[in-house]
Image (cartoon, rainbow, N blue to C red):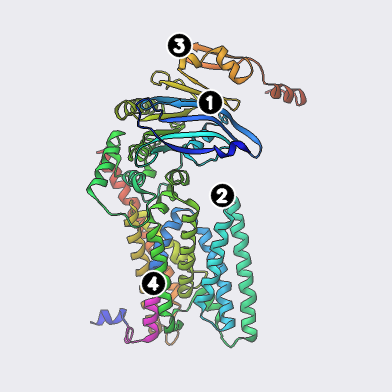
């Protein structure tokens, strides 16, 4: 009992903000993991990060206007995702450059809006919330919207599952089989925008990349079939998020009255998962090779 | 713009035994005003193994893509045999690089050939599994079916892409440079495998290559592309000095050495001579 009490500090589950954090955090982690597997497979990690940075401008605008930050994140991320697919830049180098420029503009705009926030707004700490997240301040009223966003993203990915896999393997092959490659890419980009906005709500716009890429990258070290990759990624993301929330809550007790940020613990756990998965993946492969040589 | 009406791919009822699996008529394709293909016409019959020969940049890929409907031709028609379920064309694209961390086993890639364009979550079924197994066995890929496709060798990946194309039992199989980057043994194995498939399933095969030598012993027909135009016929009718010289528009020699065929341009192309005259080659002494 005493050991359990050390991990689950008193009052953890009775606490309203913690419950909200657990629900929204789980939704964000699951959606980010599922979408992230495809984003990593398609080599669009950088684009995912850029979407998050652009969405931070929406989040800060929402603070300024006094509307739900999730709507702000969503609006700008969806706009940027649509624009990215509409521009349809095939050349990888040029896509990197354009993504980099757009990312810069997004963060610049965020800087301006957050400055306005400190001038006119009454909300202190908007910058930290938008950029690095503060899970224990998420209002409970956001839960239905957050879950709806999560459901839409999961249904979208489930619908285009096979065409998306095929066009991630080779756009030429997919097109020859009658897949509408651009439409598939657009649906993926919009699901990415939903995932990024949810993650931005929880761990902040800048750290949303960690939730998107980390669990997916770890899962690809282990799984050699798509369904399993999705399951591993969801497990890693979900466990890291809930583990991070529990550790952050506990840290109130370790450091009297001054808890450490949830985002820090989540990112730390994701890093550990990635390192373990890399070791296990490599170990497994070496063992396999050894078995074959024998 | 009169030609535009007929441009495109049209599936054709082809129940008759003598119907061509693929028929290309007066095909013309140009990109931003530059002609890539001009008046290209040929046919491939069911069960026929046809090589599409031409040097790099001669329009082989463009021709294959217009047959697939991925490139819209400005003139001419392409018709592909179809039966009930529509025109079934199998396609093996030019060497694609597959990320070693892509979470797809060889078997998953083949299954995507069967229903990869369908929406919704896949459901497992015995029929689906046995179609995939059959295609894997047809290309001799049973042993590495459960390995990650990105970790397979070039020759093994080529077999998997072939199984991916075969799994829907295509009437026409298009392969874009499948022998490039393969070692001699893999090349011979793939060529023999294709020959067997064309006989066994009466699949019409159109395979592009820049080197015709590994193919000469097995093919029924050659389509030779040069200077935007094409000549087709039996290999020994087409691969001749006077025929190819007419096609290229300048003199080339067809030389046979130890059973291998080499096509040599007898003259130095005008552009090279002009470039050398402008900027003569300087030799430096090696100390």
Residue stretch in magenta:
A9-26
In this view, the mark in front (4 or 1): 1
Chain letter of the residue carrying label 3: B
Quadrant housing residue B242: top right
Which residue, given by chain and number where applicable, does mark 1 sit on? B54
As measured in the structure, the alpha-carbon distance from the residue carrying label 4 to the one carrying label 1 is 55 Å
Indicate the quadrant containing the N terminus of chain A: top left, top right, bottom left or bottom right: bottom left
- Depth order, front residue of A62/A163: A163
Magenta span has A21? yes
- Depth order, front residue of A197/B57: B57
Tell me: A180 left or right of B140. Answer: right
Which residue, given by chain and number where applicable, does mark 2 sit on? A90
Same chain for marks 4 and 3? no
In what element is the residue under mark 1?
Answer: loop
Which residue, given by chain and number where applicable, does mark 3 sit on? B258
Give me the disc on residue A27.
Answer: 4
Q: Give the overall secondary structure of the magenta segment.
A: helix
Location of residue B91 in the rendering, given as x and y in whole percent from the top left corner: 42, 38
> Residue at point 33% right, 51% down?
A224
Magenta span has A119? no
């Amino acid at each position: 009992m005493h050991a359990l009490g050390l991990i689950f500090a008193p009052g953890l589950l009775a606490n309203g903000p913690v419950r909200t954090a657990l629900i929204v955090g789980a939704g964000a982690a699951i959606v980010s993991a599922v979408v992230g597997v495809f984003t990593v497979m398609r080599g669009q990690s950088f684009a995912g990060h850029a979407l998050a940075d652009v969405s931070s401008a929406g989040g800060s605008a929402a603070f300024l206007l006094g509307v739900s930050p999730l709507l702000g994140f969503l609006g700008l991320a969806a706009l940027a995702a649509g624009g990215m697919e509409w521009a349809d830049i095939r050349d990888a180098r040029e896509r990197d450059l354009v993504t980099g420029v757009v990312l810069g503009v997004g963060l610049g705009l965020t800087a301006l809006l957050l400055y306005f926030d400190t001038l006119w707004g009454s909300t202190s700490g908007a910058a930290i919330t938008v950029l690095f997240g503060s899970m224990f301040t998420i209002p409970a009223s956001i839960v239905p919207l957050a879950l709806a966003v999560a459901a839409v993203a999961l249904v979208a990915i489930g619908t285009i599952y096979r065409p998306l896999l095929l066009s991630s393997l080779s756009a030429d092959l997919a097109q020859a089989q009658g897949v509408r490659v651009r439409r598939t890419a657009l649906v993926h980009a919009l699901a990415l925008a939903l995932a990024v906005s949810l993650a931005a709500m929880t761990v902040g716009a800048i750290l949303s990349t960690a939730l998107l890429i980390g669990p997916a990258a770890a899962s690809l070290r282990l799984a050699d079939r798509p369904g399993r990759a999705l399951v591993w990624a969801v497990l890693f993301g979900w466990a890291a998020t809930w583990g991070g929330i529990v550790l952050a809550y506990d840290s109130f007790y370790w450091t009297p009255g001054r808890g450490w940020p949830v985002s820090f613990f989540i990112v730390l756990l994701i890093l550990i998962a990635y390192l373990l998965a890399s070791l296990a993946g490599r170990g497994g492969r070496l063992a396999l090779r050894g078995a074959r040589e024998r | 713009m009169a030609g535009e009406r007929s441009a495109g791919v049209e599936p054709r009822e082809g129940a008759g035994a003598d119907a061509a699996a693929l028929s290309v008529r007066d095909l013309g394709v140009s990109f931003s005003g530059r002609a890539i293909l001009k008046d290209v016409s040929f046919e491939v019959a069911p069960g026929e193994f046809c090589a599409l020969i031409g040097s790099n940049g001669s329009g082989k890929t463009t021709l294959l893509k217009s047959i697939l409907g991925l490139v819209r031709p400005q003139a001419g028609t392409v018709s592909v045999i179809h039966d009930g379920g529509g025109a079934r064309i199998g396609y093996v694209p030019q060497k694609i690089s597959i990320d070693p961390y892509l979470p797809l086993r060889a078997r998953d890639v083949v299954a995507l050939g069967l229903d990869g364009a369908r929406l919704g979550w896949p459901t497992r079924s015995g029929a689906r599994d046995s179609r995939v197994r059959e295609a894997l066995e047809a290309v001799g890929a049973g042993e590495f079916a459960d390995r990650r496709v990105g970790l397979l060798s070039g020759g093994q990946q080529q077999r998997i892409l072939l199984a991916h194309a075969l799994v829907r039992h295509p009437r026409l199989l298009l392969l874009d440079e499948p022998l490039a980057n393969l070692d001699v043994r893999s090349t011979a194995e793939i060529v023999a495998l294709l020959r067997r498939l064309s006989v066994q399933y009466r699949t019409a095969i159109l395979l592009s290559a820049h080197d015709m030598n590994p193919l000469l012993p097995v093919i029924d027909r050659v389509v030779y592309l040069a200077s935007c135009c094409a000549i087709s016929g039996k290999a020994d009718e087409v691969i001749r000095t006077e025929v190819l010289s007419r096609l290229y528009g300048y003199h080339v020699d067809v030389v046979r050495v130890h059973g291998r065929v080499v096509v040599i341009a007898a003259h130095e192309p005008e552009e090279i001579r002009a470039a050398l005259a402008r900027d003569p080659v300087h030799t430096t002494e090696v100390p």
